[in-house]
Image: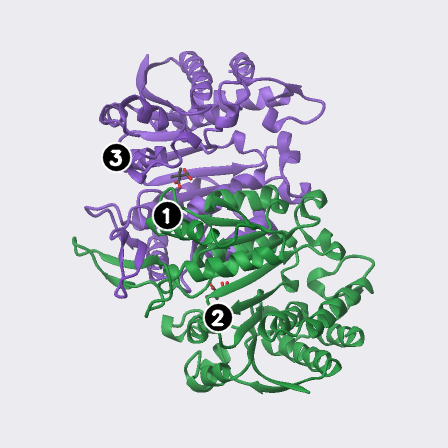
Chain colours: A purple, B green
Amino acid sequence: SKRYSITLLPGDGIGPEVISVAKNVLKLAGSLEGIEFNFQEMPMGGSALDLVGVPLPDETLLAAKKSDAVLLGAIGGYKWDKNEKHLKPETGLLQLREGLEVFANLRPATVLPQLVDASTLKKEVAEGVDVMVVRELTGGIYFGKPRGFGTNEDGEEIGFNTEVYATYEAVDHDIWVDRIARVAFETARKRHGKLCSVDKANVLEASMFWRKRVIAIAAEYPDVELSHMYVDNAAMQLVRNPKQFDTIVTNNIFGDILSDEASMITGSIGMLPSASLGSSGPGLFEPIHGSAPDIANQDKANPLATVLSAAMLLKYGLGEENAAKRIENAVLDTLNKGFRTGDIYSAGNKLVGCKEMGEEVLKSV
Amino acid sequence: SKRYSITLLPGDGIGPEVISVAKNVLKLAGSLEGIEFNFQEMPMGGSALDLVGVPLPDETLLAAKKSDAVLLGAIGGYKWDKNEKHLKPETGLLQLREGLEVFANLRPATVLPQLVDASTLKKEVAEGVDVMVVRELTGGIYFGKPRGFGTNEDGEEIGFNTEVYATYEAVDHDIWVDRIARVAFETARKRHGKLCSVDKANVLEASMFWRKRVIAIAAEYPDVELSHMYVDNAAMQLVRNPKQFDTIVTNNIFGDILSDEASMITGSIGMLPSASLGSSGPGLFEPIHGSAPDIANQDKANPLATVLSAAMLLKYGLGEENAAKRIENAVLDTLNKGFRTGDIYSAGNKLVGCKEMGEEVLKSV
Ligand SMILES: CC(C)[C@H](C(=O)O)[C@@H](O)C(=O)O
Ligand SMILES: CC(C)[C@H](C(=O)O)[C@@H](O)C(=O)O
């Protein structure tokens, strides 16, 4: 039987609750496919701050690096919102992405037929939406240097950041269009063969450079239909007609914005998983929702985004497609049976808590 | 009688058609309020490129600066899309904003009861939406230096830009949170007293600085309720529940994205005007839609966004509230009578072209 080591990072808020459900689902789906897991839980985010004073302890990063895949719950909360930058839970997440070198963030936004009413968009606009946003995750303005605070030539205080992209992986983390483009073309190829690259090439040099490299890499993928769109137009088109998109590739900050917009189009962000992949080494898998401190420890969280992140972990992280399919199907079965947590509840269905939702999924794995 | 000089910049595509309608409406509304206009038409955008080889001729900027207000149609088109940066129509627009120092871009996104069905959002989500986005327009990553192309320490080609904000107007165009914050607080005060400042202060120093200055300026406006939101969340909340917003203030690039998203939420971007204001000197008024080369010269364009931009010109640019109200009411009357251009047409209404729509508005001024 196969054996994988998984680092679990429950994090803050509802994180521990949803991770506990996903762990059980992973265990069962694995055992039915002859896979065994070693789970190791490590502190991260606000809870790591409280425990050891940093948002990403060295031991956590080390354990994550040594494992085959990392599953994260959620991080953050009011308690740490006013912390200085290096003591913010979010900084721990950025350090984790950087440390694992997971430069490609895959964020599907799919409207399930069972949940089409959850969208604020009209049914005919929302139904059938199935977009994959491929976001560059370890470069651009998030990591570009120089950055910081200072004074300008007039002696005025300033705050500044640098958006920078280069062709390929250089020593620093401010780079690399080519490799994210390749991941995006590969992803589009496995989907419906359409890739839309989003930039602001009518204004920004970093975007002109991005577009030039995406076009260069396109030569390797003649079977994928490439288009380009400005980011402001993309933000509109996602509202106007999200079905026009198959796969979107974009930089770190535009991807942050557009992937969240796309996920809200589905109306059920409690359902949406994500995968962050590097060239080698373990991938990082996490639900796209936050730590929801308001409902933490009340057994109200929707664990399905984390369960589906576990499915992505199996598929993209370990290449275990069968076990992944088991989990995806179990989630659909559970929805078909009418089980709903509060965030996706609608009349006529059965309202359940986080734990019960987990138990129902287990029955269908 | 009062006299104002107006620079008209018809621009490209449908620009000349919509400007011609708006000019007639301005003339009539003015004459009924004892106002006379001197109109001067100047080349700009792609048509200026074709005519004199630059997107913003010196004479155009000079005329604009000397006038009391500037009304722009639209610029751009496929023909110039592949031009080098300094020969793009868009560059002319950025130079115009910079030249006029119009740092505050006011972009209302209002769902009119007559057009609520045009939104892709469910009726109950769309109806009553009335958001004003105040976008910083002459700073941030659009103008920040250093910028350009080069090589990094590994000899790799790169493209880069700088996002930078300072407290107040310095010598260069990479600056100023305080003054845009003041415009936003003033705007919110005249609306429903709620201001949401959007940033990415959990990651970017430029945003942390932005937030710090917005909070400092808030002390001058104790009657305005200030909140803060991260840009990714704002992109979601605009889809989830746009009615939660009154006035939004944000930087140049986030404002570009969010104001377009907000305008698409209304479903009728052919209706939406904008105003760009400086500390003194003429304001720049333009519809938010593009030049729509596909329907240019076919009498199909919706002139109402430009007509409403003329109303903003009267109100914000010249302080002529009565004449502005005349135009706004005339547009509502015309919609109430059922006149619709193709972009906002729905069954049961009267489909008209650009010119006829203009004539109908004139009847109600
Ligand atoms: C928490 C924050 C730093 C993070 C980001 O901006 O990348 C989050 O918004 C996300 O999208 O995962
Ligand atoms: C045309 C382009 C340069 C411009 C911008 O990005 O500011 C446009 O998108 C706008 O919002 O007015």
Please tell me whether mark 2 sits on a helix, a strand or a loop.
loop
* Same chain? Circles 2 and 3: no
Depth check, mark 3 against mark 1: the one in front is: 1
Q: Is residue A77 visible?
A: no
Where is mark 2, residue-wise?
B278
Residue A338 location in percent, x, y?
65, 21
Q: CA distance from mark 2 to mark 1?
A: 25 Å
Marks 3,1: beta carbons within 8 A: no
Where is mark 3, residue-wise?
A99
Q: Which sits in the foreground, A154 or B84?
A: A154
Give me the disc on residue B208. Answer: 1
On what subunit does the disc labeled 3 rest?
A
Type of residue at label 2?
Answer: Gly
Residue A258 location in percent, x, y?
48, 46
Depth check, mark 2 against mark 3: the one in front is: 2
Type of residue at label 3?
Answer: Gly
Q: Is residue B72 above or below residue A165?
A: below
Residue A225 location in percent, x, y?
46, 52
On what subunit does the disc labeled 1 rest?
B
Type of residue at label 1?
Answer: Met
Q: Is residue A35 above or below residue B125?
A: above
Please tell me whether mark 3 sits on a helix, a strand or a loop.
helix
Q: Is residue A2 above or below residue A118?
A: above
Q: Earlier in the sequence, mark 2 or mark 1?
A: 1
On what subunit does the disc labeled 2 rest?
B
Does the beta carbon at disc 2 come under 8 Å from ligand 2?
no
- Quarter residue A134 falls in: top left
Q: CA distance from mark 2 to mark 3?
A: 45 Å
Q: CA distance from mark 3 to mark 1?
A: 24 Å
Q: Which sits in the foreground, A248 or A97?
A: A97
Give the residue displayed 35% in from the left and 52% down from the top.
Answer: B206
Q: Residues within 10 Å of mark 1 (few under 14, many from 20)?
A: many
